[in-house]
């Protein structure tokens, strides 16, 4: 895949940091504002996709490894399962929200709601890596066979 | 509000028909985008920002992936039209539409009146905040009350990625 013109490259260079920051914000504040792991994860993968579309896959080919996306996806889902099992061992029930019961938490704080922000982080990692693996497979590494 | 909803739904139906009938795959994908973005506006009008965020981001990413795939392969619709058993197609279509209308009427009769959920939802927000500590009730539901569902969705995503990577892999292919 070839890159686009210098205008698109420069604009995407300017936009990618703010998109990444917005994605992180949506993931971390998932329990306070609309959004969460799914929406934030897709925002995070969006800035990677934007960069690859703007600069072309030839320039980033050496740094792109599909197994890294698969590995981070597996890490995300194992992290989510681990959080669920933490509730099982601490509270006796699968997905039991142990920290919230121990500390009732100050309302509307970033560090509140117990295990929910951690689950949001795990879901965000999983969704971002999964969609990036799909994008790499379908749009980048697919054409290499023909060329 | 109802007029806006009805106009958007008519636009979505038109977009779906164009996407089905178009012979050019690129314009079919673009009219598929009409459905998704109109659905985003409907979610916003119905004050469901969580769903609207997810819908607009997923729709954009899906359109990018689909357009990239179309530009790399072919733009013409190569599927052949089936002209055999037209009568059977019409009969089954009419039967399905009748069943759908019947069940839709039954389902809509059992729903509460449009916009009459205010007090119930306010009570649910108070209860959910007291039980979980999360002020966004949607996140509280999908990650605390219905954690199993979210685990299932994550597993579905994991399995679909495994399927895509397996089907489109380069190593180990016979041809």
Image: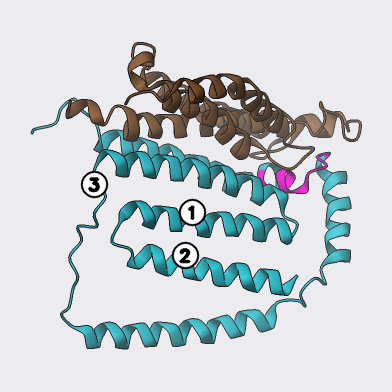
Answer whether labels 1 and 2 touch (C-beta < 8 Å): yes
Name the element at disc 1. Answer: helix
Looking at the image, is mark 1 or mark 2 earlier in the sequence?
Answer: 2
Residue drawn 45% across the image and 57% down it: B32
Which chain did the image draw in brown? Answer: A
Looking at the image, is mark 2 or mark 3 earlier in the sequence?
Answer: 2
Callouts 1 and 2 on one subunit: yes
Q: Colour of chain B?
A: cyan
Q: Position of residue B89 (x, y in %)?
A: 27, 82
Foreground pick, A57 / A97: A57
Foreground pick, A99 / A69: A69
Q: Which residue carries the number 3 mark?
A: B74
Q: Position of residue B96 (x, y in %)?
A: 40, 82
The quarter in which the N terminus of chain B is drawn is: bottom right
Sort mark 3 into few (<14), some (14-19) or many (20+) by Cα contacts within 10 Å.
few
User: Which stretch did the figure color magenta?
Assistant: B133-142
């Amino acid at each position: 895949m070839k890159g686009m013109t210098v205008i698109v490259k420069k604009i995407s260079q300017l936009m990618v940091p703010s998109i990444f920051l917005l994605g992180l914000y949506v993931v971390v504040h998932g329990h306070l504002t609309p959004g969460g792991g799914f929406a934030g994860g897709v925002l995070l993968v969006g800035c990677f996709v934007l960069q690859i579309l703007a600069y072309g896959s030839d320039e980033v080919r050496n740094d792109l490894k599909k197994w890294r996306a698969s590995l981070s996806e597996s890490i995300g889902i194992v992290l989510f399962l681990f959080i669920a099992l933490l509730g099982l061992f601490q509270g006796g029930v699968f997905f039991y929200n142990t920290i919230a019961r121990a500390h009732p938490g100050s309302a509307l704080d970033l560090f509140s709601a117990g295990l929910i922000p951690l689950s949001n982080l795990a879901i965000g990692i999983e969704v971002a890596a999964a969609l990036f693996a799909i994008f790499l497979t379908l749009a980048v590494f697919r054409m290499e066979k023909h060329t | 509000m109802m007029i806006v909803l009805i106009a958007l739904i008519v636009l979505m139906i038109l977009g779906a028909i164009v996407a089905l009938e178009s012979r050019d795959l690129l314009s079919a994908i673009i009219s598929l985008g009409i459905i998704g973005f109109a659905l985003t506006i409907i979610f916003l009008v119905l004050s469901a920002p969580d769903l609207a965020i997810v819908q607009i981001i997923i729709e954009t990413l899906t359109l990018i992936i689909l357009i990239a795939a179309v530009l790399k392969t072919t733009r013409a619709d190569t599927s052949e039209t089936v002209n055999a058993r037209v009568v059977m197609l019409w009969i089954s279509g009419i039967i399905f539409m009748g069943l759908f209308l019947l069940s839709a009427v039954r389902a809509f009769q059992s729903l509460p009146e449009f916009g009459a959920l205010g007090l119930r939802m306010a009570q649910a927000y108070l209860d959910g905040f007291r039980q979980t500590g999360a002020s966004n009730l949607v996140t509280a539901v999908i990650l605390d009350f219905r954690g199993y569902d979210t685990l299932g969705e994550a597993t579905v995503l994991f399995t679909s990625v495994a399927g895509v990577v397996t089907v489109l892999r380069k190593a180990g292919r016979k041809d």
